[in-house]
Image (cartoon, rainbow, N blue to C red):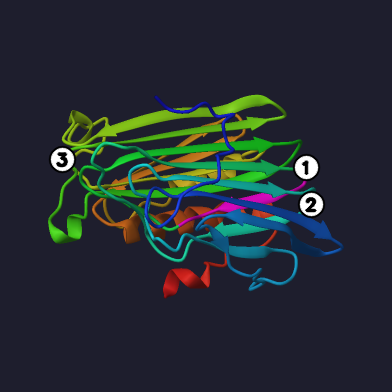
Amino acid sequence: MNAPFDSCVITPAGSAAGPWRARLQLGFERRGERTVLAERSHIGPLRLQKALYPEGERICHGIVLHPPAGIAGGDELSIDVTVGAGAHALLTTPGAGKWYRSAGAEGRLRQCIEIAPGALCEWVPQESIVFDCALGRLETRVELQGDAAFVGMEMVRFGRSASGERFTAGDFRSAIRISRDGRPVWLERSRIDGGGRLLEAGVGLAGWPVSGTLIVATPVVEDEVLEAWRGVAPIEGDGAVTRLPGVLLARFRGSSCEAGREWFVKLWSAIRPRVAGVPVTVPRIWNT
């Protein structure tokens, strides 16, 4: 069973000889016109590169590193991020994450993000690849206060399809909870079974190996932003857009992570000036 959302702290343990137990804790604060990385601590193989400022001092970029490069059965990773009042942090990863095949133990990644009033966190990791026979558990909790905003991107490839592998066994479960001032604004749980019907069903992946979600949580989503999103289509695959109170959501399914990410960047570009006051600057690491 999935662990409860409130269980975001793990017991530090693990070594190269066994499952990893790792935790990364980050805190961003606004000091004057600058967002600074005020807190950084880790246990195990999770790190953050130094604070980067490709857009100027108001926005702090960071690259989350997991040197083992993937999550194996029995691994438990936890990332806790706090973005203080008025701060703006953008976090990404250096490359595709991996969920390795397992002989029976589950691999877990828990992500907890707290965003104070007037702050923005953009959580835009690169894609994840779920290997055949993987047992993956991804849990994300976002706590918004006041007029805080959140942009989250997730792209998952089921099976190493570039080498002909399909997701025939195992399962991948994900859960996300976004709350504002303690009240849920978005709750979702999903489960994809290796070889299961959702991989081929029209209500699932419809035979495509890649699935993606872009979610923006902000107090107000203007009509013109929704219309702008609806006016942009992915270059391949299927895309759809939904608006709910305080949430704008885009779904993608297709054969290419690159096509999904290109579409998401266009959508992100349409709303970022409204939530951040600046145009999108694609993380440089995406081009390496």
The location of residue 15, given as percent across then percent down, is: 44, 54
Magenta-highlighted residues: 118-125
Residue tagged by mark 1?
A: 117
Residue 22 x %, y %: 52, 50
Residue 163 higher or lower than 23, as above or below:
below
Residue at 57% across, 31% down:
7
Q: Is residue 51 left or right of residue 135?
A: right
Residue 211 among magenta residues: no
Asked if marks 2 and 1 touch (Cβ < 8 Å), the reply is yes
- Name the spot of residue 209 as percent of width and height, x first: 23, 47
Disc 1 and disc 3: Cα gap in Å?
44 Å
> What secondary structure is found at the residue carrying circle 3?
loop
Q: Which residue is mark 2?
A: 86
Residue pictured at 62% horizontal, 39% vertical: 221
Q: Is residue 210 left or right of residue 177?
A: left
For the N terminus, the quadrant is top left
**Front one among 205 and 173:** 173
Mark 1 / mark 3, whichever is N-terminal: 1
Circle 2: is it few (<14), some (14-19), or many (20+) Cα within 10 Å?
A: many
Q: Is residue 187 above or below residue 135?
A: above
Q: Mark 3 or 2 closer to N-term? A: 2
Picture quarter containing residue 258? bottom left
Q: Which residue is mark 3?
A: 168
**Does the magenta segment cover residue 124?**
yes
